[in-house]
Image: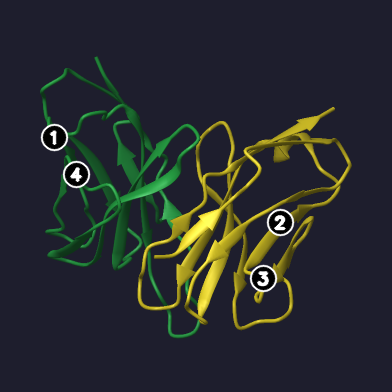
Chain colours: A yellow, B green
Amino acid sequence: AQTVTQSQPEMSVQEAETVTLSCTYDTSESDYYLFWYKQPPSRQMILVIRQEAYKQQNATENRFSVNFQKAAKSFSLKISDSQLGDAAMYFCAYRRNSGNTPLVFGKGTRLSVIA
Amino acid sequence: DGGITQSPKYLFRKEGQNVTLSCEQNLNHDAMYWYRQDPGQGLRLIYYSQIVNDFQKGDIAEGYSVSREKKESFPLTVTSAQKNPTAFYLCASSTRTAHTPSGYTFGSGTRLTVV
């Protein structure tokens, strides 16, 4: 069974600084997708960024980028120029590329942004 | 606008009672999912359904039941057999195109409290 591990239960960052959230996963599959979701205090889940495993280029969405290391099974999220609105729970998730298989989530990292 | 609706937002149940959480989507998505969220536990899969009239157990299905009689609806019943039902419940849906898998579209969640 696939597993997703987020080793940092809590992180903090100064406003305007950069922070990196870690995620590792375990799978025997070669074709899959990885996601980062944000859950603010409203508890609405928001997709931050997605990475296809077959793509070597790291995904980027504005201030958010990932460092995808397939051999190491690592998928970290970098947030640049952190803003107060980035404070939230962040979940890393894995999905096998086969039909509508469920996402497997990590336990999350709570990010605080200090003004 | 298309979306996924969970109701109610807050639900209180007496011990020993069954309760049903509603999840409706008008996105024409094939698959629907139920997750449970507890502090420090991330999102854990309860049940999922990839097509109408079919569903599969997730990692923590004991004490829960579901039905998928219509594509739009995937209600979750929390039975009296669920030993610790107080939690935040998230419903999600997804679809797959020929080339680009999607992540999920999430509902806004239901907070269930047993009193």
Please indicate whether residue A12 sits to the left or right of residue B37 in the image: right
Instruction: Name the mark nearer the viewer: 4 or 3.
Output: 3
- Tag 4: Cα neighbours inside 10 Å, few (<14), some, or many (≥20)? some
Distance from label 3 to label 2 (Cα)?
Answer: 15 Å
Please indicate whether residue A37 sits to the left or right of residue B105 in the image: right
User: Residue A108's spot in the image, x, y percent?
Assistant: 56, 44
Residue position for label 2: A77
The residue nearer to you, when weighing A101 against B32, is A101
- Tag 1: Cα neighbours inside 10 Å, few (<14), some, or many (≥20)? some
Please indicate whether residue A42 sits to the left or right of residue B104 in the image: right
User: Residue A41's spot in the image, x, y percent?
Assistant: 57, 31
Q: Name the mark on residue B62.
A: 4
Residue position for label 3: A72
| Dot 3: chain letter | A
Q: Do callouts 3 and 2 point to residues on the same chain?
A: yes
Q: Residue at x 17, y 39 (%)?
A: B63
The residue nearer to you, when weighing B106 against B4, is B106
Residue position for label 1: B79
